[in-house]
Amino acid sequence: MDTPDAPDVPRPAANELRALTAAARPDWNPDAVMTAMADAHMCGMSWADVVERMGALIADPDAAPRDLTAHIWRSKRRASNGPPDAYRKARAADPILASHTRKEPHELA
């Protein structure tokens, strides 16, 4: 029903969605669900998207709460053939990690 007095739907109901996930997916940590919803809010997902995606995740036996925003993080991550520069620098600075660092093609010759 589309009337001028109709409320915006769906209305945010984080506690209710948390209760639903606890009932439907007892293998999920309820705090992880709340963290995923907070992350979704910080990423700018609408509540309608959160409800839709969480419903799909609940139905997926291999899904986890963190998958709620995985598509956003994947799209923001720049394409790279290796780890990010900060990660490379940290590995190089640590003697143990540096000894396990992947060799670049020019270093193999």
Image: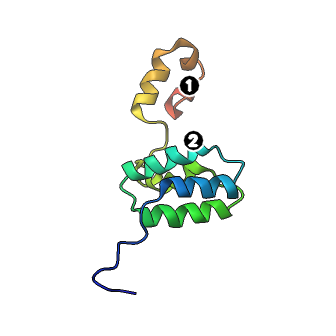
- Residue at image x 60%, y 22%? 100
Quadrant including the N terminus: bottom left
Image position of 52 (left or right of 47) = right
- Residue at image x 55%, y 57%? 17
Where residue 57 sits: x, y (%)? 61, 60
SS type, badge 2 = helix
The crowding category of the residue bearing disc 2, from other C-alpha atoms within 10 Å (few below 14, some 14 to 19, many at least 20), is few
SS type, badge 1 = loop
Q: Note whether 88 is above or below 18 in the view shown.
A: above
**Rounded to the nearest whole Å, what is the CA distance between mark 1 and mark 2?**
35 Å
Identify residue type, mark 1: Thr
> Which quadrant holds residue 90?
top left
Where residue 42 sits: x, y (%)? 37, 48
Quadrant including the C terminus: top right
Where residue 26 sits: x, y (%)? 71, 50
Residue under pointer 1: 101
Residue under pointer 2: 31
The crowding category of the residue bearing disc 1, from other C-alpha atoms within 10 Å (few below 14, some 14 to 19, many at least 20), is few
